[in-house]
Amino acid sequence: MAFISHRSLAAPVLHGRRRFLAGSAAAAAAAFTTSRASAQLTTGNPLQNAPAGCTTVPDMPTPARPDPQDASRVFSAAETVLAFRNHGMQAEFLREPLTPLGGHYLLIHFDVPQLQADGYSVAIGGRVNNPTTISLAALKARQVIQQVVTLECAGTGRSTLHPRAVYVPWFKEAMGTYRWTGTPLRSILEQAGLMNDAVEVLFTGWDAGIDLGVEHAFERSLPIKEALRDEVMLAWEHNGQPLLPQHGFPLRLVVPSWYGMASVKWLRAITVLNEPFRGVEQSKVYRFQQVAGEPGEPVTFKRVHSLIMPPGLPDLITRQRFLAPGPVVLQGTAWSGAGRIVKVEVSTDDASTWADATLVPVSPDRFAWTQWRFDWNATEGEHILACRATDEAGDVQPINPQERWNRQGMGVNGVQRMHVTVMPGIGSSRPQVPSQSRVVVRGAEAVPVPNVVNTQATPRS
């Protein structure tokens, strides 16, 4: 097994969920305190713990997910491959009202199917009076709506937990906001004629693979009440362009209030059921489980969440930020599946004190993120920035992500922390060409600056 780590492992290996549960309360508090003291000085990420013993993550398929790992900064080779395949949004795009097409996060469970728009259709059947097949062309001829919707993966924040669930090792990058174009699902279901015993609507994608040892197509269902919400739509465009292949071309479901797993891509069929769906991705995955084997609660609506757009300049490897002293406008976004954002607070002292940010609504769509701004007078030294949001339902982000611990690492919305070093002269390399490089980290080697006398081009003789 291959690992990525910043240092060698010395702590003993822990086996079994019982060990984790037995010390969960004390470990959560201790790990959180330790991380704030040590990780700030090493990695700039105070949500992470120092490496400890790592149990085995197998290289071969198994019928169960590995237990949560007691090594919060050690990732298996398989997880690393998943991280490259399923990339997150680049944090600098938090400044934009819409995420660029190539910047939106990706979570592709199996393979991207090769599909064509010409001749594409969706089958509608099950407990309906009028089973039918609707072509993509016919869908486009129906009522067309546009909605700005923030999608978020249910696994966002997974890697901020301790022990850490084994799956795509998301931190705070699995989201994005698009303007979706499509048609409402409700009128399609009503035209098909729901039978009186209809309970759920199942959405089947063209992608298929193996998870938990079982071959299946990716499928998710919604309760009838949720499927009939006005905002649920079948989408064929994002940001005015046809869906990218990796985002569900040529047709996908968009469920604005729910985490992203509900918005099934590459939509193949819609089937109305008279009993709850119990497929792998419904009954086994995307559950809030505390103990292995328990059914847990289903993951549904997005929890209130917020992010900071990184200020200043990044260190390449650690992504720690550097900026010059003086007035700085911090900005970011916030969103929730429970309704609009009513407040965002910002801390510049590691969540010790908070002050209100100014909300900057960028879209009338209630499912789009809300941008915020905060004026900060940055003083020389080390700072930990944080932000937390409150939605109209009264839900507030927890400061400690451990309050959201679950085996699969789902719905983790603890406040984001960002390590910032404020020092004079940061940014001085930008104005001049060639760049006037300077050492900002002790021990670095200075780079010689070319001596350019005449910056105008001289034709060759």
Image: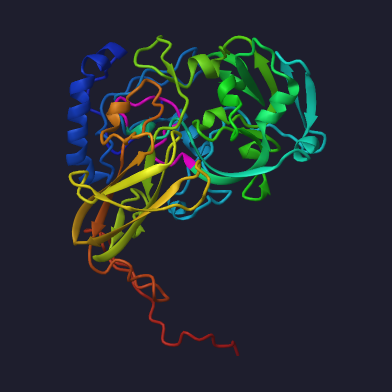
Comparing 226 with 120, the one in front is 226
Main SS type for the magenta part? loop
Comparing 90 with 435, the one in front is 90
Q: Picture coordinates of residue 405 (x, y %)?
A: 32, 24
Question: What residue do we see at 80% from left, 38% from top?
Answer: 137
Q: Is residue 209 above or below residue 6?
A: above
Q: Classify residue 452 as left or right of residue 182.
A: left
Q: Picture coordinates of residue 54 (x, y %)?
A: 31, 24
- Single out the residue that lies furthest toward the bottom: 461
Within the image, what quadrant is residue 267 found in? Answer: top right
Q: Is residue 4 visible?
A: no
Q: Picture coordinates of residue 206 (x, y %)?
A: 68, 26
**Which quadrant of the rendered structure holds the N terminus?**
top left
Q: Picture coordinates of residue 22 (x, y %)?
A: 22, 14
Q: Classify residue 404 as left or right of residue 268.
A: left
Q: Classify residue 1 as left or right of residue 458.
A: left
Q: Is residue 408 above or below residue 145?
A: above
Q: Is residue 124 above or below residue 447?
A: above
**First to last magenta residue range:** 161-175
Residue 450 belongs to the span the image colors magenta = no
Q: How is the image coloured?
A: rainbow
Q: Is residue 91 above or below residue 169?
A: below
Comparing 205 with 110, the one in front is 205
Residue 172 belongs to the span the image colors magenta = yes
Within the image, what quadrant is residue 245 found in? Answer: top right
Q: Is residue 126 visible?
A: yes
Question: What residue do we see at 49% from left, 19% from top?
Answer: 285
